[in-house]
Image (tube, grey):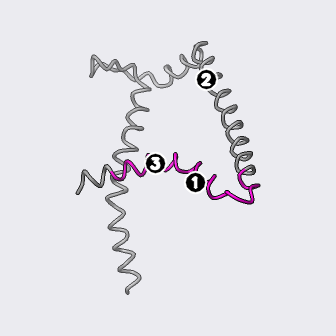
Amino acid sequence: MKVKSSYIFATKMFIPAIVFLLVVGVFPITYMIYCSMTNAYMLKPGQEELVAFTNYIRILKDQYFLQALKNTVIFTVICVIFETILGIVLAMFINSFKHGQKAFRTIILVPMMVPQITVSLMWQMMLS
């Protein structure tokens, strides 16, 4: 009985979070898909017509879009490869030290932690 009641309690606690995620996440995505399949003009609401995939076909035929898409893919692939290799090399370099390993890890991690700490302290001050 105890396990079942805790399961029910946990489920009740998750329901508001799931509803919030659906409202904040799924509704805008669904509305965006709907708008992309119409010829909606946001300055004149209520006059849109359903054009289905015409917008997608038109953008896939546009040379500027295809060039921008190609540039984005190339840039992303190069950056991911470069940053992965750089991260592995730095990790191996720092791991090779016999002394001062903790200091180097601290020097590298502190700039990543400062923004989160600052934001959490600001929220703590605002809410207290």
- Residue type at mark 3 is Val
Residue placed most toward the observer, 21 or 116: 116
Residue placed most toward the observer, 120 or 55: 120
Q: Nearer the viewer, mark 1 or mark 3?
A: 1
Label 1 to label 3, Cα distance in Å? 12 Å
Q: Earlier in the sequence, mark 1 or mark 3?
A: 1
Going 46% across and 48% down the picture, which residue do you hit?
114
Please count the marks in the image: 3
Magenta residue check for 64 = no
Give the class, few, some or many, for how many residues have Cα within 10 Å of label 3's Cα (few <14, many ≥20).
few
- Residue type at mark 2 is Leu
> Could you tell whether 88 is left or right of 61 in the image?
right
Q: Which residue is mark 2?
A: 69
**Start-end of magenta stretch:** 94-121
Magenta residue check for 116 = yes
User: For the residue labelled by badge 3, is the local secondary structure a helix, a strand or a loop?
Assistant: helix
Q: Which residue is mark 1?
A: 106
User: For the residue labelled by badge 2, is the local secondary structure a helix, a strand or a loop?
Assistant: helix
Q: Which residue is mark 3?
A: 114
Label 1 to label 2, Cα distance in Å? 39 Å
